[in-house]
Amino acid sequence: MREPNPTIGPLAFAVPMLLAGLVFALAIVAAGYRDLPFPDWAQVVLCFGLPGAFGGILASVQHINLPGLLGSSENEHWTRDRARNVFLALLIGALGGVGGSGAALFVMLVDDKIKFPMTEVARLSAITSGLLGGFVGFQLLKRVAEGALNPAAKAEAEQAGKKAASKVAKQVSDERAALNEALLEAMAALGNRKSPKGKSAIREVTPTLEKLYAEYPDNRTAAIVLARLHRWGSGDYKKGIEVLTTCHKAMLDGKDDRARDIAAVLFNRACYWCQLSSAANNPNAADEKANCYKDLEAAIKSNAKVAADAADDDDFDPIKREERFKTLLAAHGVTV
């Protein structure tokens, strides 16, 4: 039998924990940089994988009760064989954590929660999700391993997996329901925008919808309604343009063909550019009018039917007498 050594145990615990903690800390620091020298897919893997491994190690520490073992005064608790086993347990925990974070990543990809390019906030959110996924992932790995010997434990692990999946699905469903409810409140407030009560309702619902929209930046309806809240609530056309620009970029980054949605977003943004350009004593009027025409032309190119909408929309009154506007609509069979 090998001689016990009380220093081996702490080293077997401390070395992997310090390395994992250092890597996790580096991931958090890197998340704060605006531009990382990695492709988007590598950033996603790192932001989920490394914290997931760290979360798995934390879960394994809890499982094998290392704090109690390290505090033991009995030297025979630590031999080289035991230290090796502890090290392997931490390694298995890290692998289980990576699997759990990978599952979390898959769920978020399916729900289209990850947008490219990744921002600093998105990276920190991914790190948090990876850490939690890693911690839970090791717990499920433990249950599955026990299930190989115990059918009852295996059934329990399967049930735990179903509950976890159901919880994620319910969270997504609740978020969508909250977004739809906020949209209904916002549209009702916009419908009464000329009354004092309607203006107050606009101010109340704007921050709520803004927070919910951040989870679904490619949602056309949410973007258009939120932009209108900024327009009619505070008269902030530029904030409305910012919201629509974010939505437009998110839709372009997506894989689906969303020509009609893109046309609707660009059409609304063109309205805001037109209103901005018509303001008195505006030194940026020429550039804003150019942006208006650029968005309107692109909207019509994506969906020719919006040409008729432009002819009837009061937001374009400042340019309806211009030859360029008439020519643009006439090319699509619309007379002003």
Image (tube, helix red, strand yellow):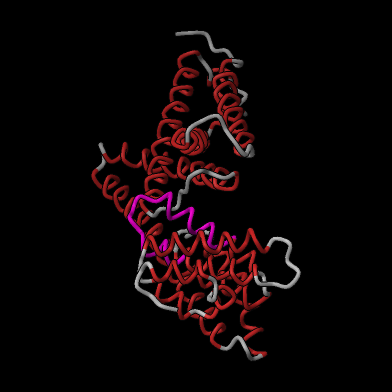
- Magenta segment: 242-265
x%, y% of residue 285? 67, 64
Q: Residue furthest top?
A: 2
Q: Where 171 sits versus 117, above or below? A: below
Q: How many marks?
A: 0
Q: Where 170 sits versus 46, above or below? A: below
* Viewer-closest of 262 and 321: 321
Q: Can residue 209 be seen in this view?
A: yes
Q: Where 287 sits versus 198, above or below? A: above
Main secondary structure of the magenta stretch: helix
Q: Residue furthest front?
A: 323
Q: Where 178 sits versus 28, above or below? A: below
Q: Which residue is drawn at 56% across and 73% down?
A: 319
Q: Which residue is drawn at 50% across and 61% down?
A: 295
x%, y% of residue 163? 35, 56
* Viewer-closest of 91 and 51: 51
Picture quadrant where residue 171 is located: bottom left
x%, y% of residue 180? 45, 73
x%, y% of residue 203? 65, 77
Q: Which residue is drawn at 54% across and 71% down?
A: 322
- Would residue 262 be counted in the magenta stretch? yes
Q: Which residue lies furthest to the right in this view?
A: 281
Q: Is residue 57 visible?
A: no
- Would residue 14 be counted in the magenta stretch? no
Q: 281 left or right of 150?
A: right
Placement of the N terminus among the 4 image quadrants: top left
* Viewer-closest of 155 and 140: 140
Placement of the C terminus among the 4 image quadrants: bottom left
Picture quadrant where residue 12 is located: top right
